[in-house]
Image: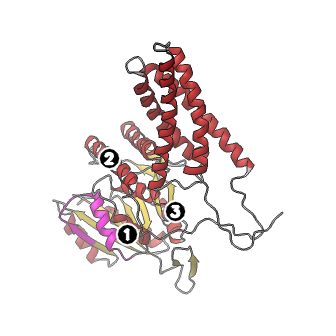
Amino acid sequence: MTAEREVTIDTGLRRWSVGRVATVDVVIPVFNEERALPGCLHVLRSFLEDQFPFAWTITVVDNASTDGVLQVATDLAASDDRVRVVHLDRKGRGLALRTAWACSDADVVVYMDVDLSTSLDALLPLVVPLVNGHSDIAIGSRLAPGARTVRSPRREVISRCYNAMIRLSHGARFSDAQCGFKAARTEVIRPLLAHVHDDGWFFDTELLLLAEHNGLRIHEVPVDWVEDADSRVRVLSTALADIRGLARVAQAKMTGAARVAELPQRPAPRCAHPDVVLAAGGRGELTWQVAVFGLIGLVSTAATAVLYALLRSWWPPLVANLAALVMVTLLNTEANRRLTFPSAATSGRRVHLQGLVVFGLYCGLTSGALLCLQAWDAHPSRWLEVAVLLGATVLGTAGRFVLLRSWVFRARTVPMTGEAGTR
């Protein structure tokens, strides 16, 4: 692309000029990488010069290294004015990215590891959706369909378990939080940085959870990735820190502290064709929702009954019922968010509070049924308790569907351009 032929794209957030003026800053955090850095910069510069169509810079961030990597980086930067060096007196990958991204003057900021474990062929697919305004953040994924990885079974299991934990606890839609290959539009990353508290390995996960919670669009690129045999990540301590971080972000969502008011707002979906009418909430959609919700409800009801029967051996009826409901409801709500009401806006403190109210009503109905049974028969059989619980659960499930559809996951009105035609 050349400056003489610039294409302007209006995304609703800002006007982007696609061409030489679209700038990309590639950030590489390093800690005691004196040997690896020269080869990394040689390969990366060659790739950017030969195959990358945008103006670029490389920022090397030294994380309080004790070897000679700072001098190596400084010498390399002296020979190329597109390479910059930042020195920090404190360690932390998150701190390095926060510092470099906050002061970058580029349109798009990128992060990659110095070992170049991720193939550079994925760099352009990572950046283009951000430059043309389609997405706000882009991540390389080792777990997305089409990705190819070479790593030990131990690292594979740990990665999959961690990302499954993120999806279960937060309902995240992205598949790989920790791949060292990410990019973001600078105008959306700066407001987010003020709300990201972690400066270590959890930085990536916290950033993505906040971005998704605030309605930003995250684009995933399946990558080719080869594990670095010299990796210095301490798996156990990192995993414990990540679990604490997940709990902290969940609390921020509940209290409303995870909302970022300064973010530019992406325009709502709209129909571009003047003669097309979008029929939201039609009969077909309701039929699908009832069918999917019913299937999820059947599985949840069976799971609740089994758990209750097991827990009742140790606990009284109300405690056993509450424990079974809490465990099953976590999975049930996530399944409904993904499958039954996938098009509804589900972020924000209001949604979480409404979900708690629905759960409270549902729990009150089932617990009330057990109390009535106890009042009628002081020593009912175990199977009679289970039968009463099943009946109350079916009734509560129907009420829960009505509340979820009409209140918690209420469909938004979709504005349309032009005059809607009829057929």
Is 260 displayed left or right of 344 in the figure? left
Q: Which residue is mark 1?
A: 190
Do the residues under discs 3 and 1 have CB atoms within 8 angstroms?
Answer: no
Callout 1: helix, strand or loop? helix
Residue neighbourhood size for the residue with mark 3, other residues' Cα within 10 Å, grouped as few (<14), some (14–19), many (≥20): some
Farthest residue in the right direction?
Answer: 423
Q: Residue at x 47, y 81 (%)?
A: 21
Q: CA distance from mark 2 to mark 1?
A: 23 Å
* Any part of residue 228 in sight: no
Q: CA distance from mark 3 to mark 1?
A: 22 Å
* 86 is within the stretch colored magenta: yes
Quadrant that contains the N terminus: bottom right
Percent position of residue 140, x then y: 46, 55
The one nearer the camera, 210 or 164, is 210
Q: Which residue is mark 2?
A: 242
Q: CA distance from mark 3 to mark 2?
A: 29 Å
The one nearer the camera, 108 or 65, is 108
Percent position of residue 274, x then y: 75, 71
- The magenta span reads 85-105
Farthest residue in the left direction?
Answer: 66
Is 76 displayed left or right of 415 in the figure? left
Q: Answer with mark 3 or mark 2, whichever residue precedes in sequence.
A: 3
Q: Amino acid at mark 1?
A: Arg
Residue neighbourhood size for the residue with mark 2, other residues' Cα within 10 Å, grouped as few (<14), some (14–19), many (≥20): many
Q: Of the residues tagged 3 and 2, which is closer to the observer?
A: 2
* Mark seen at residue 125: 3
* Mark seen at residue 24: none
